[in-house]
Amino acid sequence: MYVVELTFECFDNTTISAVDRAVNGLMDALRYNGQVLGREFPMVMGDGQFHVRAVCPEKDSLSPKYSSPQVKQKLKQLTDACLLSPKVKVLGRDINSEESAPDEARSWQVMYTTYVHTCSPLRCGETLLPIPLYRIPATFNGDHKAEVKWQTEWQACDEIQMAGAFKAEHALWRKSRMPIACCSAKGGISVAVLNT
């Protein structure tokens, strides 16, 4: 994974709320396409510029060739907030993150996450290294929001279970049916529901 800084320059007078809406809308679209990871993107203002830091699966994750229709739309909407398209600076490799799986053929892949993972939930079956979501065909509506939402929900359940200080997690696990998803190398998703 790589830490990047996106710099948004103003080309005219604007408001903080307009910038906030536009930049956070873009960051959400990038997240749901798998181009940025995590849920929090600190934004700093200074001298007519706004800086956002994020973690990406690869050095070139923010390349336009990976942009979903939603990302392209949000980039166009930056002008409504008087912002230019962001300049991207790769700050370096995140030494606390896993590297992404090489972009090569795989015989199988699996959806896997825990509450401590911030990488892609899609893993190479042979190596268990994370596969950037933008490398596979979009699942619904042109992006990977469904996979990102699955990861977020699974992480929430895993955190409840790992905290373990109360009996609440036992009730959760007895009442729930947690889906496990496996994906073929062609991008199809099979879901199995396990009773616990």
Image (cartoon, rainbow, N blue to C red):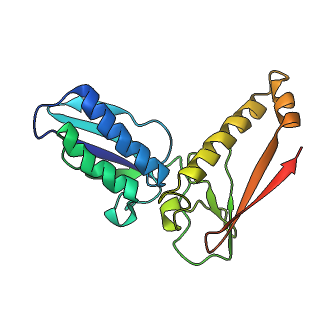
Please give the name of the residue rendered at 73% of the width and 38% of the height, measured from the top-left corner: 158
Asked whether residue 136 is in view, the answer is yes
Side of 45 relative to 61 (left or right): left
As drawn, the residue found furthest toward the front would be 141
Residue 133 picture location, percent across and down: 52, 60
Residue 77 picture location, percent across and down: 26, 46
Please give the name of the residue rendered at 23% of the width and 42% of the height, measured from the top-left corner: 8
Side of 160 relative to 130 (left or right): right
Q: Quadrant of the C terminus?
A: top right
Side of 86 relative to 91 (left or right): left
- Pick the front one: 162 or 35: 35
Residue 172 picture location, percent across and down: 82, 32
Residue 35 picture location, percent across and down: 44, 54
- Pick the front one: 10 or 142: 142
As drawn, the residue found furthest toward the top would be 166
Is residue 157 shown above or below 96?
Answer: above
Is residue 153 shown above or below 73?
Answer: above
Please give the name of the residue rendered at 80% of the width and 22% of the height, measured from the top-left corner: 165
Q: How many marks?
A: 0
Asked whether residue 94 is in view, the answer is no
